[in-house]
Amino acid sequence: MAPTHEVDVEAQIGQWRAYVLRHQAMHPSDVAELEDHLRDQVADLQQVGLSEDEAFLVSVKRLGSLDVLSREFAREHSERLWKQLVLTPGLDQPGGRGTRDLAVALGFAVGAALAIRLPALAGLDMADDAGFYLRNLSLFVLPLLVGYFAVRRRLGAAALSLLAPPFLVAAVVANVYPFTATGATELLVAIHLPIALWFVVGLAYAAGDWRSRRRRMDFIRFTGEWVVYYALIALGGGVLTALTAGAFSAIGLDLTEFVATWMVPCGAAGAVVVAAWLVEAKQSVVENMAPVLTRVFTPLFTLMLVAFLVAVAWTGTGFDIERDLLIIFDLLLVLVLGLLLYSVSARDPIAPPEAFDRLQVLLVGSALVVDLLVLIAMVSRVADFGPSPNKLAALGLNLILLVNLAWSARLYAGFLRRRRPFSALERWQTGYLPVYAGWAGVVVVAFPPAFAFA
C-alpha cells in the first residue's frame, strides 16, 4: 500500500489536472503534456531532497499562473482556438467523433420533440389538459436526455437497469394518483418531479459513478452550464419564433396555432438535449461562462440581502409569508445556493483565500439569516392556520437549506481562518446533493396521498 503522502500528492495532481482542463482553452493532449512537465519537475526536486508534497507545490509555482499559461497558449494557437470555439473537435471531419456525437444528440432531441406531441394523438390538448402536461413534462424529455448520456458514456445493461425504475415510479405517480384538478398536490408534483428526476440524469452523466465526489462536482458544473446554454437557446428561439410568425403574417398566413402547438413545445423539448450536447462539446473552451456570471451576480445578491436585512432591522417589523412571497423567498434562497455551488465548483481548491471568498461568506451568512426569518414566519403561520401541502413542502425545503447554509458558512469561515481546507466545503456540498433529491421524492410520492390528493 502506498504511503499516505504519495496518495495525497496524486490527489493534488488530479485536482490540478481537473482545474486546468475546465478552466483553460487547451486540448486534453496539451494538458497531458503539461502534466508530464509537472511530474518531471516533481521527480527532479525529489532527487535533491524535497518531499513529494514540497516538490509538488514548488513545481506548480514554477509552472506559473494558469491564467498566464492560458493567455500564452491562446496567443500561440489563436487559429486553433477559434476553430475550437466554432467547431466541436472532429466535427469538421466526416465520420469523426464530433460528427457522431452531434448526430446522437440531434436524434435524441428530435425524439424529445416528438414525445411531447404524442399525447395529442390520444386527444389530449395542452390547453384543456394542462394538468396532465404539467405533471408529465419531465417524463417527456428527461428520459431522452438520460438516453443521450447512456449512449455517450456507453452505459451497460446494469447501469440502465438502475436508471429505469425512477422513471417508472414517476410515471405511475403522475398518471395513476387521483389528483384534484388544479389542486395543491398536483402542483407540488409538477414542481418537484423534475428536480427528483434531474438527479437520475446525474447518475447517467456520472456513468454510474455517483459515489465519486469529483463526478458529483462535474455534474454541478454541467448543471450550471446547461442552464446558461438553455437560456441562450430559449432567447434565440423566442426571437426566431417572433420573426417567423411576423414574416408569414405579412403574407396573410396565421401561424399562431402552429407556433403554440408545435414550434414552441417541440423546440423547448429538443433544446434540453441540444443544450446538454453544447455543454459536453464546448466544456474545454467556454466553460468559464457560468463562473463569470457567478462573479457578477454574487456581489449583487449579497448587496440585496444585506440591504433587506438592514431594512428589516430598521423598520422593526416582521414580514408575512403569503404564498407568492413564499415562492419568492424560496427562489431567492435556491439562487443563492446555486451561486455558492457553482463558485465552489469553479474555484481552484489549492488557491489561498481571497476577497471573493469573504464576499461568499457574507452572502451565505445573509441568506442564512433570511432563511431563519422565513422559517419563523412559516412556523407561526402553520401554528395559526394549520398545515397545508404547500406550507409543509416549503418548510421542509427551508429546513434543508438552513442546514446546508449553516454548515457551509462554518466550513467557509474555517477556510478563511486557514483552519480547514477548501476541499472540506466541496465534500460537504457534493455529499449533501442527495438530500435534495430525497426530499423532492418524498414530496412527489408521499404528499399527494397524505393530503388526499387535494
Image (cartoon, rainbow, N blue to C red):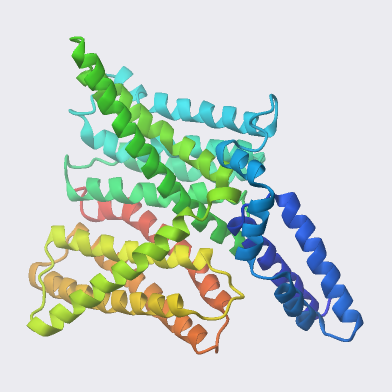
Identified at 55% across, 61% down, the residue is 217
When the figure is inspected, residue 191 is found, relative to residue 143, above or below; the finding is below
Which corner quadrant of the image does residue 352 belong to? Answer: bottom right
When the figure is inspected, residue 32 is found, relative to residue 275, above or below; the finding is below
Q: Quadrant of the N terminus?
A: bottom right
Left or right: where 265 falls relative to 17? left
Residue at far front of view: 75
**Nearer to us in this view, 381 or 38:** 38
Identified at 33% across, 62% down, the residue is 334
When the figure is inspected, residue 52 is found, relative to residue 432, above or below; the finding is below
Can residue 236 be seen in this snapshot?
Answer: yes
Identified at 19% across, 50% down, the residue is 184
Which corner quadrant of the image does residue 137 belong to? Answer: top left
- Estimate the x, y position of residue 338 in percent, counting from the top left: 39, 62
Left or right: where 280 falls relative to 236? right
Identified at 36% across, 67% down, the residue is 298
Can residue 436 be seen in this snapshot?
Answer: no
- Estimate the x, y position of residue 380 in percent, counting from the top left: 13, 75
Which corner quadrant of the image does residue 265 belong to? Answer: top left
**Nearer to us in this view, 22 or 210:** 22
- Estimate the x, y position of residue 97 in percent, counting from the top left: 68, 33
- Estimate the x, y position of residue 350 in percent, counting from the top left: 62, 75
Left or right: where 281 falls relative to 374? right
Residue at far top of view: 252
